[in-house]
Image (tube, rainbow, N blue to C red):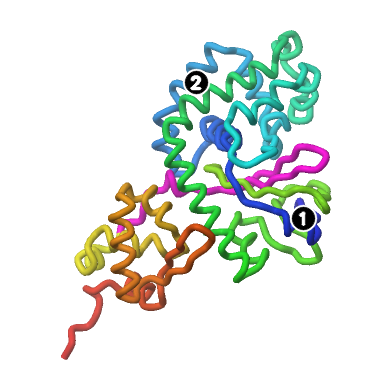
């Protein structure tokens, strides 16, 4: 298994955030690989145009074939951002500064020998950047405001656990293979790579719509762990009909989604209801004792109370009639 070695300074300064470039690379991976069911409608909508673009740009196709291995991706595609809230153009500045020898060296870690088209072509960094711009503009940017709301809501939810559960609780939910091992060790995946020493360095956790946890770095002092958030693609669980009849369909849906802490921002993004409507439903559910609430920074998180969990698990039609 692979591990990050961390110390107190690393954890105190670690932060959660988002990245337009990471989201774009994640979309690129989804377009190339078999996907989970909740990703399929999105992929079906874009994969035809993606394949046509690769057919028209053979250097793009060769770059992708060489850049992604079974357990590794070329480093130039996965560099974490230096600052939060950068645009994709700002994040691409590092990639576009690289020369062809650097690009080929990164690709050679994943695949050897490289195909002739990559050995003879020039301007490889510019080609890779243009491919990423195409994926961003075509498949991510049109829905970026909604994606960002979901990602930010997930960040708020996870960071709120830190004070209650510590890093062990926060890390436990990032992915099936991510866990706190103790003694300054974080398991990041099950690949057999040497431990990565990030003590005294910058560590970022990046929320993205991806299928698995990925690690990346900008040497010598910046490291990142990208973890899956699927809320924007997942089909919302439909509440049982008796529960919908009891509470109304929208309130029942909100109660079901609040199995884990959720914010009004996340509920607006996932339900399509207005902020005012969501706020009204949350107030009613909270006053009825079905939801708990707590402020976390500038957001307020809601989750099922014990009563709320019992109501969701045992809809009204399954209750015995009063005698």
Q: CA distance from mark 1 to mark 2?
A: 41 Å
Residue 92 point in image, percent of width and height: 65, 27
Marks 1/2 in contact by CB < 8 Å: the verdict is no
Of 1 and 259, the residue lying toward us: 259
Of 114 and 141, the residue lying toward us: 141
- The residue identified by callout 1 is 10
- Residue occupying the point 73% across, 32% down: 75
Q: Is residue 41 above or below residue 183?
A: above
Residue 195 at least partly seen? no
Q: State which quadrant residue 316 falls in.
A: bottom left
Of 196 and 30, the residue lying toward us: 196
Of 57 and 190, the residue lying toward us: 57
Q: State which quadrant residue 85 falls in.
A: top right
Is 276 left or right of 220, judged from the image as shown? left
- The residue identified by callout 2 is 51
Q: Is residue 56 above or below residue 18?
A: above
Q: Which residues are magenta?
A: 212-238
């Amino acid at each position: 298994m692979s591990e990050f070695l961390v110390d107190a300074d690393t954890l105190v300064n670690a932060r959660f955030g988002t990245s337009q470039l990471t989201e774009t690379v994640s979309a690129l991976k989804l377009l190339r690989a078999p996907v989970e069911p909740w990703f399929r409608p999105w992929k079906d909508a874009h994969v035809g145009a993606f394949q046509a673009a690769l057919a028209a740009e053979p250097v793009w196709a060769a770059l992708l074939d060489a850049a992604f291995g079974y357990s590794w991706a070329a480093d130039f595609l996965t560099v974490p951002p230096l600052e939060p809230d950068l645009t994709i153009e700002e994040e691409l500045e590092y990639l576009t500064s690289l020369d062809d020898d650097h690009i080929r060296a990164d690709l050679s870690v994943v695949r050897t020998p490289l195909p002739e088209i990559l050995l003879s072509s020039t301007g490889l960094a510019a080609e890779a950047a243009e491919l990423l711009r195409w994926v961003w503009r075509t498949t991510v940017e049109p829905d970026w405001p909604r994606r960002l709301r979901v990602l930010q809501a997930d960040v708020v939810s996870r960071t709120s656990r830190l004070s209650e559960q510590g890093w062990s609780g926060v890390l436990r939910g990032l992915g099936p293979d991510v866990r706190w091992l103790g003694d300054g060790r974080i398991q990041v995946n099950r690949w057999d790579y040497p431990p990565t020493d990030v003590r005294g360095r910058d560590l970022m956790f990046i929320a993205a719509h991806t299928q698995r946890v990925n690690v990346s770095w900008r040497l010598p002092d910046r490291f990142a762990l990208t973890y899956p958030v699927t809320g924007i693609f997942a089909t919302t669980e439909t509440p049982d009909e008796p529960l919908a009849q009891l509470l109304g369909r929208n309130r029942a849906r909100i109660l079901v989604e609040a199995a884990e802490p959720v914010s009004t921002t996340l509920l607006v993004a996932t339900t399509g209801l207005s902020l005012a409507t969501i706020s009204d439903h949350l107030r009613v559910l909270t006053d009825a004792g079905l939801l708990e609430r707590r402020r976390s920074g500038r957001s307020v998180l809601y989750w099922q109370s014990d009563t709320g969990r019992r109501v969701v698990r045992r809809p009204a039609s399954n209750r015995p009639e009063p005698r």
